[in-house]
Image (tube, rainbow, N blue to C red):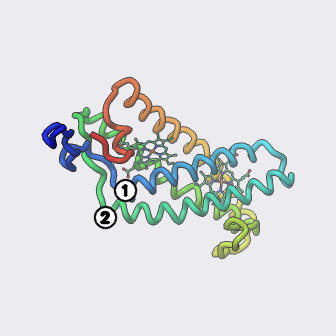
Amino acid sequence: MTTLDLPAAPRAADRLPHYDRVQRAFHWSMAAVIIAAMLIGLYCAYQPPGQATRRFLLEWHKSLGMTALVLVVLRIAYRVAVAAPPYAERMSRLNHAAAAGAHLGLYALMLLMPLTGYWNSAAGGYSLPFFWLFQWPRVLPIDKASSRVGEELHLWGAWAIYAVVGVHVAAVAWHHLVKRDSVLSRMLPGIR
Ligand code: HEM
Ligand code: HEM
């Protein structure tokens, strides 16, 4: 085999546009943390208050939620500095607007959920753990009425995040399995 028979190495210009390494790391680590927090939160919602397993799982839930808060602040700063890549295929204005709206909604909920969770626990005088390593500072005065407002917003936000994440994952599956375009590959390492 001569060197002429060797397949050409992929050039950067041949790759489909995709989110950079840092954006992908933020996306997949946060997707895992948030889905885990949502599943634990949902399970705890069906356990009686004060029950030992619920208390234990809520420590995990709060720790994962506070991890998401730290990550989303860094992620938003990075996203402001580095734009999303262009789409490889032509897409209707409606499709662009729907994707932008859903992404904005996801960013809003990624902030709202940990902030209202923190509000509920901090104002309620409950624990604010980070994986049994330390407690987060309580920056709100203990006030049960205020805690209930945080709780109510957290519970409404839970419905919103179930819906928006559900639509987001369904939309990606539709692009990949029905339209067979390159939307999923935007969030994967660059492929030709
Ligand atoms: C990305 C972050 C978060 C997500 C997605 C999330 C999601 C959820 C969900 C889905 C539930 C169950 C709601 C229900 O159906 O009843 C829940 C409950 C709860 N979450 Fe979070 N949460 C997050 C962060 C936090 C944080 C940071 C804290 C506290 C520091 C927290 C404290 C709680 C508590 C105490 C409950 C139980 C509320 C109750 O049953 O009254 N969450 N959360
Ligand atoms: C297994 C589940 C998931 C899959 C397969 C997935 C896949 C994707 C893909 C392919 C994109 C690029 C879409 C485009 O360019 O139009 C994307 C973007 C995005 N995803 Fe997900 N995702 C998942 C879960 C999540 C979760 C749980 C969240 C947060 C709660 C999330 C938040 C986002 C955000 C905010 C963007 C926009 C990123 C930006 O433009 O900065 N994703 N996702």
Residue shown at 47% from the left, 65% from the top:
73
Tell me the residue that label 2 is attached to.
81
* Residue 108 position in % (x across, y down): 47, 53
Residue at the far top: name it: 178
* Residue 27 position in % (x across, y down): 45, 52
Q: Please give left or right for residue 126 compared with residue 28 in the image.
A: right
Of discs 2 and 1, which sits in the foreground?
1
Residue at the far left: name it: 4
Mark 1 secondary-structure assignment: helix
Tell which of 168 and 11 is nearer to you: 11
Tell me the residue that label 1 is attached to.
21
| Snapshot quadrant of residue 65 | bottom right
Q: Please give left or right for residue 91 compared with residue 171 in the image.
A: left
* Residue 76 position in % (x across, y down): 41, 61
Residue 114 higher or lower than 85, as above or below: below
2 or 1: tag closer to the N-terminus: 1
* Quadrant, the N terminus: top left
Q: Please give left or right for residue 24 compared with residue 65 in the image.
A: left
Q: Residues within 10 Å of mark 1 (few under 14, many from 20)?
A: few
Q: Looking at mark 2, is its residue's CB closer than 8 Å to ligand 2? A: no
* Residue 151 position in % (x across, y down): 68, 55
Tell which of 135 and 182 is nearer to you: 182
